Image (cartoon, rainbow, N blue to C red):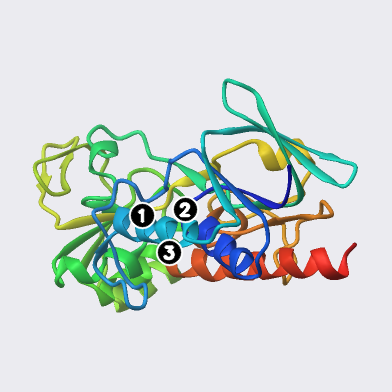
Amino acid sequence: MTHDVIIIGGSYAGLAAGLQLARARRRVLVINAGMRRNRFAGASHGFLTQDGTPAAEITAKGRAQLLAYDTVEWLSGEATRAEAVEGGFRVTVGDTCEKRAGRRLVLALGVKDHLPGIPGLEERWGRSVFHCPYCHGYELDRGRIGVLATSPKSIHHAMILPDWGQTTFFLNGAFSPDPEQTEQLRRRGVVLDDGVIDRLDGDGATIVMRDGRVVPLDGLFTLTRTSTASPIAEQLGCAFDEGPTGAVIRTDAIKATTVPGAFACGDAARMAGSVTLAVGDGALAGMAAHQSLIFGG
C-alpha cells in the first residue's frame, strides 16, 4: 500500500502533523524510534492547557488520540533510509529493512543534544540542568541560577535568566565578555565567575570549582550543540541552515524543504525549540502536506 503521507518521528511535531492529515481522512504512517528530546524531563511547562503535565503523558495521550483515526498506522522502529522515487518516497525501516511507500514525507526527526563534557552534568540533564528558561525557569522559585558558558552566544542566557533568579555566569574558559557586555551583565545583576569548573555534585546542580570552591545552585542552564537525530534529511539532499546551536533543515513559510514533496517540522527544522513551537510547526507541516496532495499533483 502507498500511504498518502509518511511521517518520520512520533513526538510532538510528528503527532501534530499526523492529526491534521488524519482529520483530512488521509492514509498516514507514523514511524517512531521512541527517542523524545525531552525524555529526561519530568514535566512539560509553558504549553497551554498542559502546563506541568508529565512530558511522556502528553505524547502518550497524543498518540492515543491520533490512532483513534482509522486511516493512521503506527510503526515503532527507526527509519534508516529514505529516497525519492517516482510518485513519492520509499522509506526503509529497522533491522528487517521493511520498505514503505508514501506520496509525501514529513520529517519530524528531532535533535540530539551534545552536552559539555563536565563530570556530573549529563546525569542531571533535564532534572537540574536545562537549556530553556521558559520551560524550567519558573520552577526554580527565584533561586540560585547558574549559566555555563559554552560560547559567546551563552551571554544571551546570562542576560535573560535574572528574571527567574539570582544568576551567576560561569565563563569556564569559554570566552571573556568585552567591557560593554560586562556592563550589560552588571546592570542585570549577573555575577561573573571566571574560574574553571571541575564537576557537578549533590542532588541539585552544585558546582565544584577546580580551586576548591563549592557553589550551590538550584538550577544550571547551558547551550548545547545540536544535530538532527537522524541522517534521513541529509540522505534526501535537503538543504540546511546554520542555527545558533547547530544546523537545522531549511524550510519555507509552509515547512516545505528544498526536496519537492518533503516537509520538515519541530526542533530539527527550527532555530529554537519547545513543545509549544513543535506542535504548531507540526500542525503547519501536516496541513501543507495535505494541500500539496491536492494542488501539487
Front residue of this view, candidates 30 and 139: 30
Q: Which mark sits nearer the N-terminus, 2 or 1?
A: 2
Q: Are marks 2 and 1 in contact (CB under 8 Å)?
A: no
Tag 2 secondary structure: loop
The circle drawn on residue 28 is: none
For image coordinates 46% across by 50% down, the residue present is: 151
For the N terminus, which image quadrant? top right
Mark 1: secondary structure: helix
Q: Residue at x 43, y 64 (%)?
A: 275
Judging by the rendered image, the residue that carries numbered circle 2 is 11
Q: Which residue is mark 1?
A: 60
The answer to which of marks 2 and 3 sits earlier in the sequence is 2
Q: Amino acid at mark 3?
A: Val
Work out which residue is located at the far front of the displayed protein and give it: 70
The secondary structure type at the circle numbered 3 is helix
Of badges 2 and 3, the one in the foreground is 2
Q: Residues within 10 Å of mark 1 (few under 14, many from 20)?
A: few
Query: Relative to residue 209, is residue 113 drawn left or right?
Result: right
Instruction: Determine crowd level at label 2: few under 14, some 14-19, many 20+ residues with C-alpha closer than 10 A.
Output: many
Alpha carbon separation for disc pair 2 and 3: 9 Å
Q: Quadrant of residue 25?
A: bottom right
Location of residue 62 in the rendering, given as x and y in whole percent from the top left corner: 42, 61
Spatial separation of the CA atoms under disc 1 and disc 3 = 14 Å
> Could you tell me which residue is drawn at 41 percent across and 45 percent down?
174
To which residue does mark 3 refer? Answer: 275
For marks 1 and 3 on the same chain, the one whose residue lies earlier in the sequence: 1
Q: Are marks 2 and 3 in contact (CB under 8 Å)?
A: no
Q: Amino acid at mark 1?
A: Ala
Q: Of the residues shown, which amino acid type is indicated by label 2? A: Ser
Q: Quadrant of the C terminus?
A: bottom right
Q: Position of residue 253 (x, y in %)?
A: 72, 72
